[in-house]
Image (cartoon, rainbow, N blue to C red):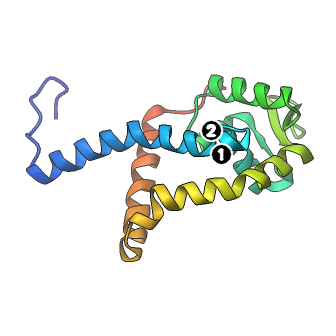
């Protein structure tokens, strides 16, 4: 379809889905941040700590971390720098080729992530997971993964 062509109108079900998704995209991050506020880390900081905790050697190239977290290269740099000021993450030159930086989870960062994990899990369950019937979880997970992957591909290769 040409960019200037009128798109087909949404069906009533599509319209409801689109509007509900819009409400969710705006309200869920605020709710999750409220739930995480007592942990001392934001939801985004927790996500980065969690990703690093699962990475081999608790380290990742900055560009890979940005992609895994769904953040821009400049945003991940600012976030890692902030976490570094609190001793939760360090930045090191990439060991194999010396080009680029790696984010490395510190022992303090791992402890912080583990301490915040119960609040994160409780929030995820209370806000989302406990409200979705178990039978729908696999299909919904696959659909959301496909949407996120498509958006990542459209964004193009990382520039950081």
* Residue 30 falls left or right of residue 43: left
| Vertical relation: 75 (above or below) 47 | above
Q: Quadrant of residue 122?
A: bottom right
Residue 12: percent from left, percent from top: 9, 50
Specify the quadrant that holds the N terminus. top left
Q: Quadrant of residue 130?
A: bottom left
Distance between mark 2 and mark 1 Cα atoms: 5 Å
Q: Which residue is mark 1?
A: 47
Looking at the picture, tell me which residue is in the foreground, 129 or 3.
Answer: 129
Q: Which mark is residue 44?
A: 2
Crowding around mark 2 (Cα neighbors within 10 Å: few <14, some 14 to 19, many 20+) is: some
| Vertical relation: 124 (above or below) 138 | above
Residue 132: percent from left, percent from top: 38, 66
Query: Are dots 2 and 1 in contact, CB under 8 Å?
Result: yes
Residue 110: percent from left, percent from top: 84, 50
Is residue 96 in view from this perspective? yes
Residue 71: percent from left, percent from top: 58, 33
Specify the quadrant that holds the C terminus. top right
Q: Quadrant of residue 79?
A: top right
């Amino acid at each position: 379809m040409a960019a200037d062509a009128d798109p087909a109108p949404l069906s009533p079900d599509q319209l409801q889905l689109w509007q509900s998704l819009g409400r969710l995209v705006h309200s869920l991050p605020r709710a999750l941040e409220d739930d995480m506020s007592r942990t001392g880390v934001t939801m985004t900081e927790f996500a980065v700590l969690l990703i690093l905790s699962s990475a081999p050697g608790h380290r990742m190239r900055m560009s890979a971390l940005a992609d895994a977290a769904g953040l821009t290269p400049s945003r991940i740099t600012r976030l890692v720098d902030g976490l570094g000021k609190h001793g939760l993450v360090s930045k090191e030159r990439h060991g194999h080729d010396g080009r680029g930086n790696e984010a490395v989870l510190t022992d303090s960062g791992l402890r912080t992530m583990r301490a915040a994990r119960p609040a994160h899990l409780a929030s995820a369950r209370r806000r989302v997971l406990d409200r979705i019937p178990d039978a729908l979880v696999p299909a919904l997970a696959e659909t959301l993964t496909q949407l996120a992957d498509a958006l990542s591909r459209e964004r193009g290769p990382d520039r950081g």
